[in-house]
Image: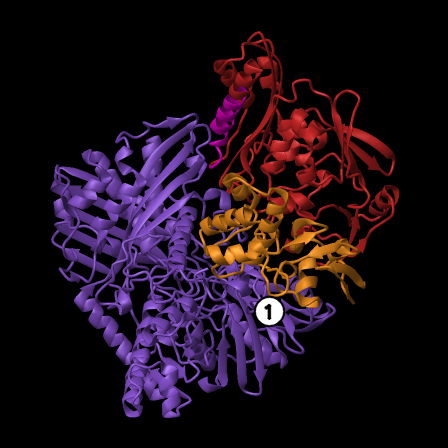
Chain colours: A purple, B red, C orange
Amino acid sequence: MTRTVDGEHLVGQPIDRIDGPAKTTGGARFSAEHAYPGLTHAALVPATVSRGRITAIDTAAAAAVPGVITVLTHGNAPKLNPPKRPTPANLSTLVSGTQVNYLNTDEVHWDGQPVAVVVAETSHAAREAAALVHVSYERLPAVVDFAAEEPNAVAQKGNPVMPGSAKKGDADAALAVAPVTVDARYTTPQHHHNALEPHATTAVWQGDELTVHDSTQSITWLRKHLALRFGVPEAKVRVLAPFVGGGFGGKGFAWPGTIIAVLAARATGRPVRLLLTREDVHRAVGARTPSAQRVALGADTGGRLTALVHTSVTRTSRVGGQPEQVTAPAQHLYDATNIRTAQSQTTLDWMPNTSMRAPGDAIGSFALESAIDELAGELGIDPVELRMRNEPERNPIDGKRFSHRMLREAYALGARRFGWENRSPEPRSTRDGRWLVGMGVATAYHPAMQFTANVTVRLAADGTVTVRCGFQEMGMGNATVQAQIAADALGVPFEAVRVEYGDSALPASVMAGGSMQTSTVAGSVLAACGKLTRRLSTLARRTGMQGRTPTEILTAARVPFIDAAVGSDTRLGALAGQARMLAKVVRDQRTWAKAACGAHFCEVRVDADTGEVRVSRWTAAFDVGRVINRKTAFSQLRGGIVMGIGMALFEEALVDRRTGRIMNPSLSGYHVPVHADVPPIDIACLDEPDPTMPLGILGVGEVGITGVAAAIANAIHHATGSRIRDLPITPDKLVT
Amino acid sequence: MIPFDYRRPDDIGTAVATVTGNPRAAFLGGGTNLVDHMKLGVAEPELLVDVTGLTSRDIERLPDGGLRVGAGVRNSDLAADPLVRERFPVLAQALLSGASGQLRNLATTGGNLLQRTRCVYFQDVTTPCNKREPGQGCSALEGYHRHHAVLGASRQCVAVHPSDLAVALAALDAVVRVQGPGGERTIPAETLHRLPGEHPERDTVLEHGELITAVDLPGLPFGPRSRYRKARDRASFAFALVSVAAALDVAGGLVRDVRIAFGGLAHKPWRARLAEDALRGRPAAPDEFRAAAEAELADAQPLRDNGFKVPMARNMLVSVLTELSAEDGAA
Amino acid sequence: MRLNVTVNGEPKQADDVWEGESLLYVLRERLGLPGSKNACEQGECGSCTVYLDGVPVCSCLVAAGQAEGHDVRTVEGLADGDTLDPVQQSFVDAGAVQCGFCTPGLVVAAHDLLHRVPDPSDEEIREALAGNLCRCTGYEKILDAVRNAAATS
């Protein structure tokens, strides 16, 4: 038990998470678990064509099912304001998953777009009725085959945070004359987040006041978005999400289920709960884009990179979607003399893609880090040594300084713990019975960012501290970590701190994404605690209580509590906050190359008979800045690695090229790793604070998954001699 | 899910009569496959007749050294049974390689045999499928068929049967006991499931209303030297790409007798008679095993994306027989 | 139908139950026990795991009619008042919990494993819990939690 650590800093301690007992006893209430009088249940009716126009919807059979209250279609649903086009001037516009105005249009834009919703007294009545809704379509020509569209991809437009392309020197010319080259194509399929909790919404209207329990990663933006779509003032909308059953990016945006649940509650005048089925989760929530990538490397015989080309094609949709920074790692990892990166996109009649854990970096690092391994093989140089020979002093593409970069140290630490020196250089040189054994290595890299969050902190005369901030907790442990930070900053015990979060009535925070929530909230908590400390000193001086406890000072001053706020939720305050945030992000981007990084080492065993791959050992050494809580941070890193194992070996949406329909929308069809797939995972962190981030935090949510698939592919090559460049690496690709 | 009536009759005769009398009635066992199919709309029975309290949950010894397994015996109980583990390890291994603990605790012996294919087009009612709706066409021929059949398929259907248990039973010459409206009959496990031919909608030779009541495992002296091996996409909780069940009897370095069945290759568990015949009397050596496997797989007709199953099945059989022959020699 | 079922040691009744609805639905919506989770409702994730007559099953696949007259124990029935069951405490201590959605099913499955096999090997733990998907933790700390619970009980 580590709840109280007397006389020591709490930051850095492996404190137990504060919501542990609620979650192990079944006491935690998720978004589909709030009871309201008169609660109804909704079920979606998904379109079964990829592009078309609804010509008729027959709802008679559905409406006749006992318990059905209504069937809403574009013919009878209440009006919904269309989403705003995304604009950097209002970041909440980014939160709309698609540009479709659900149930307010007869147009179908993807296979799975909800075209009706049934509201009933029970969920089984709603689902039964939903299956009876008969929709007729005029089918329109649809473009659904990503591979076939690849030649038609167009260059991706850049933005200040994510340049579409980058260039240093003339990489293509350098490649043409390089003595040693690798030039290869890599592909990755569509991945689904598949958080264990399906997206769920409970929506309650009381007059024009709306309360929504939603499994969202973005309380603040979702609230703004709902206010816009339903034409009510933001102050009338409250979004609650104290417990979210995993997100990984899949709950960052407002997807149709949320909007339609609120719409159905408005139409029926009753509370509505809409819990997506696992099939809905695949069809009505964006996924990670598939990609096709080229990495071309040129080097001199000493292994110095003279040319690095990384290009990518990803997929977006006619009704939304976003670019992915697939080639970003190539701009930061290697000190190549000449670099060219370029990203392009195809546009399909498809569900818009969305962020999934380390968007861009997770799949881009697969290609780049596989190619580096291939080059090491061509050169006959150890792949760790090759990386060290090309480790840059400054950001390779533009010469910016690194705020912090300890990749050399991470490699040294990881190699030692893993026993890398025992690796025989030759592929297919180690066998244990029928198992071919191999070792692989790859770099992890994820940019670090800090936004701004509004926070209030109250210090009461009874010694308790209340931190209030509308951040979200999807399991990362943010509530626990912020309590540690506040307790340290104010010199109170951990148990004295209560953290309120997951409610849009609290001061507005950022979305949970981009590995920046902890650092962002920490920055504001520290600032607020600093204000409190200064005010406490003033009170102490005034009352002659210097050096005494907060309780003694406040009691002497006859003050029941003191508050400190950072940021403001007023309209002007919010605008100023947003401007401040953008300015800070842009300034940071211009000044520093800032990132978490690390080194993955793994051992795989490949069954010589079947091509089945088992990951048997893993060591990862990270530079993630300061670690606030080893228990929660290491779990995040480990979870990222395991999701990467899934990406490497099994995860793949089977999209029928003829129809654009996902054919495996279930957890038996879409394989995520099970317990038996996971080896012991040794995690080490250098634990050196980054000088430019609050408490030196660089973020742990995403860096873990980057590089993982490449490390495995490299180990498989080492084990078998087969280089697999198309994920996932299923047994059929290896059996001979 | 379409609503249905639910009945728990008092005896097997009533259950059989009830289902026989209603073409849209179905027996309900552990429900692990049927209930899922009802949720997907793949199965839409109007009456479920629950037989979980009716069929035997006992495993009895037979005089010939075999066992009689009640159709209601749960997969977990069957896998854990000491006699099964001792006499027919291939069966326990097959069961434990399937599904998860929670599902094995629900799934029954009879129900396991009657589970239906995992073909993604069969499971999606919006896509054409001859097995679900004869005459619609087969979407898998030109679609996703990495898991599909390389032996005995037809243009109508290339699905594979997913049961691990059925593969072990086919290898063990098990006999399925069935009660129907006309009384009892027995069916060799090997012929319970059928090839798709022109009627892929029929998985088995059972008539509507026939209920599996037990499975007999005849005594097999070399049953203790048997093994099940399964290749799959992840380490656990996944259906077979290919599986092999085998039992081997070696005397003086020669194969005296052998039983082999493959899973994941066909619309039914594939009893490898050609390989067995090729091996009897031959040296128990990897080259012989390989030649026998190749003889069995010579007629394989892979589709675009499932050709890997042929070398995979061959390698697995060679490995399993090699291991069993080593075991045999040591014993 | 009127459903009679013993839940966490207490006889419970629910009226107007359709025999075809799932035991999971009965527990969550009719008996006020949402601890068992509905992550897939197809038997593919284990988050709805409960004891049915002493063996863990996916409650999403059990029809209410099949539960009639039987004994059910859910995650809510493991703790003794405010004192967590050793398995629950071990999950908290080991850091085996993240988002918490898979946790109740895992706790029940681990509880069952330790009652059947008091000192399981790592391989036995990994295989026994293979029916319980977790997307957050990376499983390692769940393994630790089961090991620790085995050592302390």
Q: Is residue A288 visible?
A: yes
Residue A542 or residue B257, whichever sits in front: A542
Query: Quick check: is B134 in the magenta stretch?
Result: no
Answer with left or right where residue A174 lies relative to residue B259.
left
Q: Looking at the magenta stretch, what is its main secondary structure?
A: helix
- Which range of residues does the magenta coloring cover? B305-321
Q: Would residue A423 be found to the left or right of residue C81 on screen?
A: left
The percent coordinates of residue B186 (x first, y second) are 79, 29
Q: In the structure shown, which secondary structural element does the residue marked by tag 1 occupy? A: loop
Q: Which residue is mark 1?
A: A33
Q: Quadrant of residue A691?
A: bottom left
Q: Position of residue B141 (x, y in %)?
A: 53, 40
User: Which is more toward the observer, A207 or A635?
Assistant: A635
Q: Amino acid at mark 1?
A: Glu
Question: Residue sitting at 27 percent across and 29 percent down?
Answer: A426
Q: Is residue B245 visible?
A: no
Dot 1 alpha-carbon crowd within 10 angstroms: few under 14, some 14 to 19, many 20 or more: many
Using the image as rendered, state which of residue A557 and residue C111 is in the foreground: A557
A106 shown above or below A630: below
